[in-house]
Image: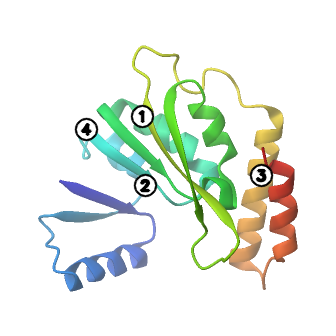
Amino acid sequence: RVLTCEVDAAAAQVARELLHWAGVGTSEVEVLVGRAADWAAIGYLGLVDVLVLDHRGSRYHEDLAVMSPQLSPGARIVADNVLTPGAPLFLAYIDGAYHVEIHEAEEFLRPGRTDWMVVCTPIHGGPPAGEVPAPPEFARWSWQIDDLCWQSASGPFVRREDWENLHTDIAP
């Protein structure tokens, strides 16, 4: 059973139309409107084998914390856009509590810009995720990333230089 959650009802309808166009039936993939955490809270999702995080990187760690009790043994968490725009609090949250693989790729439609896709699995018997607070600079970076994202969504545009400066500051 495949479930996908879209916060935006219009995006959910587009997803349904694309699935229909591709010949995928509603019995194969169900598109839900709302946050996965809300659906999990009412017990609708059941055990989750694969959790894909691909929305707002500054929320990935919160969503994973809420979804963790729903993860099946051996579950995989796939997080996109971890470097661009970024998800520093997510990286701090999973540190030491998850087996982590970082896959580097060129950002979609942005030649020359690198992004990370993170695939991780919980370490059974390991320390709980988020046990150690994130370093203060991670919270600052998360805020800066959110600020640039909101500017790019609501304003005329964000200069490429602003993103490059932030990524230079964050780079390992």
Q: Amino acid at mark 2?
A: Arg
Regarding mark 3 in the picture, which secondary structure is present there?
helix
- Tell me if label 2 and label 4 are in contact, CB under 8 Å: no
CA distance separating discs 2 and 4 = 16 Å
Query: How far across and down, in percent of the image, does residue 51 sit?
Result: 38, 47
Residue appearing at x 36%, y 30% in the figure? 69
| Circle nearer the N terminus (4, 3) | 4
Q: Looking at the image, is mark 4 or mark 1 nearer the viewer?
A: 1
Neighbor class of circle 4 (other Cα within 10 Å; few <14, some 14-19, many 20+) is some
- Mark 1 closeness class: few <14, some 14–19, many ≥20 residues within 10 Å: some
Q: Which residue is mark 2?
A: 35
Q: Quadrant of residue 112?
A: bottom right
Picture residue at 27% right of the left edge, 83% below the top = 17
Q: Considering only order in the chain, which callout, 1 or 3, is on the residue closer to the N terminus?
A: 1
> What residue type is disc 4 on?
Leu
The residue carrying mark 4 is 47
Place residue 107 in its image quadrant. Answer: bottom right
Q: Disc 1 on helix, strand or loop?
A: strand
